[in-house]
């Protein structure tokens, strides 16, 4: 089976994770990082999850799963060690037309979660369509070595440039050429070695003398 690649906006949407172990905690962590409103169902939770519940960042919906807990949910993740229960959660979610992921058994749900490499706003997602999570982990480790935190800083600059340039000019072709020039230039490498003078020289050569890190409100 092939899966349709997609990035979901879950900010402020109600999401439910059933299972309070380490696996469930990892799923909750990612959802929180994406701004979701997260509920958890489990008779016991790991220490990290307990802290999030106490801080009011995660809602402890119940100790045991019941179908009505899916009411109003946008997405549900079944992360228990009980396959029969996970299958029931997936079936209940399907009846309600909900997005559902079943940890370790992707065929039970309707979407899978890729291995991720995160560098600020840059997200690299790796999927083997459920064939080999081990290979997905290896590829993630390989990419982590290649894509460092300079990509986060580079994208911070590009985002600020894009916002200002699109506000100043409606010439889409000219703007596209400038964006391409920046991406094809040595800007990324200069960001990596923290050569601020070199960064500003490129910005001003491509965009004009009033484009500086200070004017773009970027500080390192």
Image (cartoon, rainbow, N blue to C red):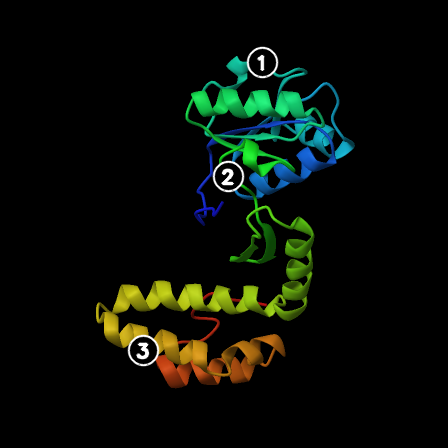
* Residue 66 location (% of width, % of height): 58, 13
* Residue 25 location (% of width, % of height): 68, 35
Kindly identify which residue carries mark 3: 177
Which element type, helix, strand or loop, lies under badge 2?
loop
* Residue 87 location (% of width, % of height): 59, 24
In the picture provided, is 124 more to the left or to the right than 42? left
Task: Measure the alpha-carbon separation of dots 3 and 1.
Answer: 55 Å
Q: Callout 2 environment at 10 Å: few (<14), some (14 to 19), or many (20+)?
A: some
Residue closest to the far front? 1
Kindly identify which residue carries mark 2: 111
In the picture provided, is 196 more to the left or to the right than 133? left
The picture quadrant where one finds residue 26 is top right
Q: Callout 3 environment at 10 Å: few (<14), some (14 to 19), or many (20+)?
A: few
Q: Nearer the viewer, mark 2 or mark 1?
A: 2
Answer whether labels 3 and 2 touch (C-beta < 8 Å): no
Label placed on residue 66: 1
Task: Measure the alpha-carbon separation of dots 3 and 2.
Answer: 37 Å
Sequence-wise, the earlier of marks 3 and 2 is: 2
The residue lying toward the viewer, choosing from 194 and 65, is 65
- Residue 206 vertical placement versus 50 (above, below): below
Sequence-wise, the earlier of marks 3 and 1 is: 1
């Amino acid at each position: 089976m092939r899966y349709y690649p997609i990035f979901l906006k879950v900010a402020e949407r109600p999401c439910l994770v059933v299972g309070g172990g380490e696996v469930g905690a990892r799923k909750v962590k990612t959802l929180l990082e994406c701004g979701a409103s997260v509920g958890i169902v489990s008779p016991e939770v790991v220490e990290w999850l307990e802290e999030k519940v106490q801080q009011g960042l995660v809602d402890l919906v119940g100790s045991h799963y019941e179908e009505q807990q899916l009411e109003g949910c946008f997405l549900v993740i079944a992360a228990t060690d009980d396959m029969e229960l996970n299958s029931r959660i997936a079936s209940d979610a399907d009846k309600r037309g909900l997005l559902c992921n079943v940890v370790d058994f992707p065929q039970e749900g309707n979407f899978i979660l890729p291995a991720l490499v995160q560098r600020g706003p840059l997200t690299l997602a790796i999927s083997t369509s459920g064939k080999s999570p081990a290979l997905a982990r290896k590829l993630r480790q390989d990419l982590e070595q290649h894509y460092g935190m300079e990509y986060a800083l580079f994208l911070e600059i590009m985002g600020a440039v894009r916002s200002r340039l699109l506000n100043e000019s409606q010439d889409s072709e000219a703007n596209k050429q400038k964006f391409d020039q920046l991406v094809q230039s040595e800007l990324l490498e200069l960001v990596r070695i923290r050569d601020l003078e070199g960064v500003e020289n490129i910005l001003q050569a491509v965009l004009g003398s009033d484009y500086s890190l200070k004017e773009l409100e970027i500080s390192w």
